[in-house]
Image (tube, rainbow, N blue to C red):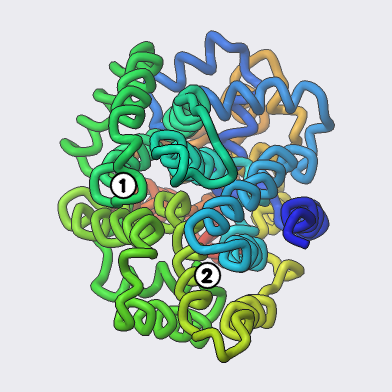
Amino acid sequence: MWRWAIPGLLLLNVLLKFWALGLNELAGDEPFTVYWAQRPLAELFGMLRTENNPPLYFLFMHGWSALVPLDAAWLRVPSAVFSILTVWPLFLIGKRLVGPLAGLTAALLFTLSNHSLGFAHEVRAYSLLALACTWAVWQLVYLSDFDKPIGFRKNGLRGGTILWLVAANVLAVWAHYFGWLMVGIELVLVFAVPLLRPVRVKMLAAAGITALLSLPWAGVVLARAGESLGRGTWVDVPTWEEPYNMLLRWSNAPVVAVLFLVLIALALARGKARSMQVPLLWSGLPLIGMFAISFVVPVYIDRYLYFASPAFYLLVAMAATVQLNSRQPVWLLPAGAVLGMFATFTPWKSNGIHPSAVKAQVEAWREGNTTVMIQPEWYDLTYGWQLDPVLFKGAAPIAIALHERGIFPIPAAEMPALDSTVATVVHIDSWASLTDPGHEVLNELRKRYTQVDSVEADKKVMVRRFRKR
């Protein structure tokens, strides 16, 4: 019966995650990934030395985007595939720790998560990171059997290698720098969880090899960490309810989140903590640890914690599976948990972000000699994609192509020199206060021109029109 679980889970994920890949417009950090994936490798690596991104995902997208149309749905295929594959090791972890029902339940909860679906449909490295982290934990669980006496091993396993564990960890840290957090969690797991203690030496060796293989990028990691510690991040300090909000995102809806927390609490109260140590530490350490750290260096946003979400689904699945005694249907609570996620799963729902509306508004207001200003400057890639995706493949940097069209991304609070013949200025404000907290550019425009229109063209994106006095 259970031998069909993995093929069935993979097929279900294919159907759900390939459906509506192009539903949402390319937005947020996606245009950044797509643009740099089109650039020559020398330019790409030059950018990566000053950005918070390892090279692996960009290199992968560099190759993939050369094979497919420059279209949002096609560009999201790799992220969808990484998310689909995550259910495989997730099922195997649950099966090994508790039983196949726990593995199936965890994989279904992950499959029916709106949060997970969002990252499966995003041209960013987060679904690759989640796959690598889940794979790494599976390797720890798998290897733990090899170091036991033969009589205690499951499935007659007789040998093991750390090569796949190293591969999973290298994949994680070269996909995203937060992969190093997962390496740290794995080290905690092998020393804190009795089941995994037999692989302490192998995990230490794997961590060492991972560090050696990451030496080419060590300087960049240290430099970026130092800058974040010194200058801070763009993320706000979290409020006290933010850990619950994170669980809410993972659970689709408030009522489901509360029911999941009750299940976990009941399992812990019944003394099941020992059997749930792996997902408890894997999800709990980042959920609480990163929350505490964020009062010094704010990093508490859902994308940075996404790698811990598979552990939460595993924790819920294990809590549901161990609750009932032999006189009750063992599938009752797991089925209820899955039904709760299914009832609140909305794969057809758009994220409500429409940068095309910004472009349409700007074009409607352009008349005569018009200059378009963009703040912050990095929104230029989102606007450039809407203007013409072919600009991403141009030989010259996109800034030059935009300047030729009278479009100027504004670095910090630097007001560009305007020709006296400019009759209309359109100002795109996509969180301009982040780089221009005093609104110096906007105030200068109001001094020189008359503001005649203002509209929120997209979620948190204001477009203002100014005319010459």
Determine which of the numbered discs, if any, sits on residue 317 in the image: 2
Relative image position of residue 119 (x, y in whole percent): 59, 52
Is residue 370 visible to the viewer in this orientation of the structure?
Answer: no
> Foreground residue, 307 or 100?
100
Quadrant in which residue 186 is drawn: top left
Q: Residues within 10 Å of mark 2 (few under 14, many from 20)?
A: many
Residue assigned mark 1 = 189
Tell whether 209 sits left or right of 55.
left
> In what element is the residue under mark 2?
helix
Name the residue rendered at 51%, 57% in the picture: 310
Q: Which of marks 1 and 2 is nearer the N terminus?
A: 1
> Foreground residue, 288 or 409?
288
Which residue of the protein is positioned furthest toward the bottom in this rendering? 327
Relative image position of residue 35 (x, y in whole percent): 62, 29
Q: In this view, does 253 lie above or below 455?
A: below
Relative image position of residue 287 (x, y in whole percent): 32, 60
Q: What residue type is labelled 2?
A: Ala
Q: How crowded is mark 1: few (under 14 residues within 10 Å), some or many (20 or more)?
A: many
Name the residue rendered at 72%, 67% in the picture: 347
Mark 1 vs mark 2, CA separation in Å: 19 Å
Q: Is residue 306 above or below residue 185?
A: below
Relative image position of residue 380 (x, y in whole percent): 56, 38
Q: Are marks 1 and 2 in contact (CB under 8 Å)?
A: no
> Foreground residue, 440 or 423?
440
Name the residue rendered at 36%, 74% in the picture: 244
Determine which of the numbered discs, if any, sits on residue 135 in the image: none
Q: Which amino acid does label 1 sit on?
A: Leu
Tell whether 38 sits left or right of 374.
right
Q: In this view, does 463 lie above or below 105?
A: above
